[in-house]
Image (tube, helix red, strand yellow):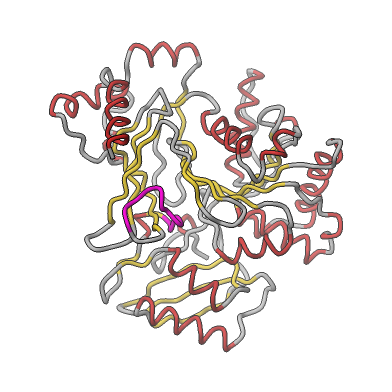
Amino acid sequence: MDAQRQTLAEMIEEIRDIPIYRTSIEEGSFPILEKPEIARGFPDNWMTPKLARALEAGEAEFVLSTGTNHARMQIIRPPFFLLRSYYRLWSEHPDVADTWQQGCQRVSITTVLATEHVARLNARRRGAEAPALPSVPSIDERRLDERTLYLNLRLDPALWDRGDVERMLDEMTAVQEAHPRGWYHLDCDGYHFAHLVQKALSSGAWQRFPRPASIIHAYEYTPANVRRFLAQHFECPIIDLFGSTELGYLYYSDRHGRYWPYLDRMHLELIPVEQGSTIYSLIVSSVRNPCMPLIRYRSGDCAETVDGSPDPLRIRRFCGRERELLRLERGGLLSQAHLDDWIAAAAPSVFVYQLRPSGPRRARLLYTTFDGGPVEAAAARELQQRVLDGAGLECALEHREHIAIGKSGKYAWLAQEGETTERGGL
């Protein structure tokens, strides 16, 4: 604890000139920093002479947080802040550092928003207007740097057609063949990559699918069934990264699924989301981003520890977004991770799913499967019983051929009846 207090004290020395913190420094007390407070008076509340010079020199930039299913937040950070955090972790990770050291190219399969962002960056470098989809950015326009290429050109990966799949496999193969050992690194959103694997299998293209030498998934919660599906088809290490646009990466998993902290220039507190709960809110203090240090910032993410204690070094998993916790009629909270546990145990064929509360103690669970068919009756009954026992919900299971992705390019596990596609609706 003494070391943690010293870390916080050192951080405070670095933020003395930032207007938003002046009152807290004078009073010697830092309340939890919420997202609306960050936006209030932005950017003036964060502006210092040093930051103004950095912005003018191009050493800092305004960006928006990714926003899974919540409002995007404007922040200031150095260019390629998240990418540098990623590259450092890749280069140091004991399970995948060899692909970094061998000079492997990084192929990224994630949201189309990320591809469009890269295309706009390259357009600005050329002094041109950014290309707007559906005009197709070329490979050069989708290359972030000498190491990373983005592939996805559609919002909803479930709607990729044979042409999309063939193009992506061709581009992955070209990257693989350019390496002397036939290696490449696959960066992905777990859902997007699983869609590509599923479509390659169903279309007869699996034989030509270039196998990566290492895989990292990040960007959103990856359900257990998706992780298992990927592990069944790839022998290389599959690693998860946890972080955010504004903070960088905070934790990484090893190839066995255990999480390890990566809290360089950070201090982390775990606070119960409600009294008596073992689901914790992440309260992060970080000076890793010199343009916008965050002190006692509520990231909006939730975690659980191996022993239920509020020890950041004992986090066993991240269980979703705080604002997407479902308050149960009988008391307590349901996180995505809890529902995911029951689905993974009872129905391993379930792919995408969405829970829709439909009344007191009732809900509908919409789902797709990897094989396209409904789950077997026995598995359905077991899953319904697990949801009833765990959450007190009578749950009707409804198989769907398609569950639409949100306009952010990410899925919502929880939605109220009648909500729009941004919440992952049909």
| 338 lies above or below 380 | above
Where residue 148 appears, x then y in whole percent?
Answer: 69, 34
Where residue 49 appears, x then y in whole percent?
Answer: 34, 11
Q: In this rendering, does residue 142 appear at all? A: no
Q: Is residue 61 left or right of residue 143?
A: left
Q: Please, which residue is most extreme toward the left here?
A: 27
Q: In this rendering, does residue 190 appear at all? A: yes
Where residue 375 appears, x then y in whole percent?
Answer: 61, 81
Closer to the camera, 295 or 312? 312
Q: Residue at x 45, y 57 (%)?
A: 316
Q: Name the image quarter holding residue 198.
A: bottom right
Q: Name the image quarter holding residue 120.
A: top right
Q: Residue at x 41, y 23 (%)?
A: 290
| 211 lies above or below 128 | below
How many numbered marks does the figure carry? 0
Q: Residue at x 41, y 60 (%)?
A: 306
Q: Is residue 271 left or right of residue 130?
A: left
The answer to whether residue 319 is magenta is: yes
Q: Which residues are magenta?
A: 309-320
Q: Is residue 332 left or right of residue 75?
A: left
Where residue 64 appears, x then y in whole percent?
Answer: 45, 35
Q: Please, which residue is most extreme toward the front here?
A: 2
The answer to whether residue 259 is magenta is: no
Q: The N terminus is located in which quarter?
A: top left
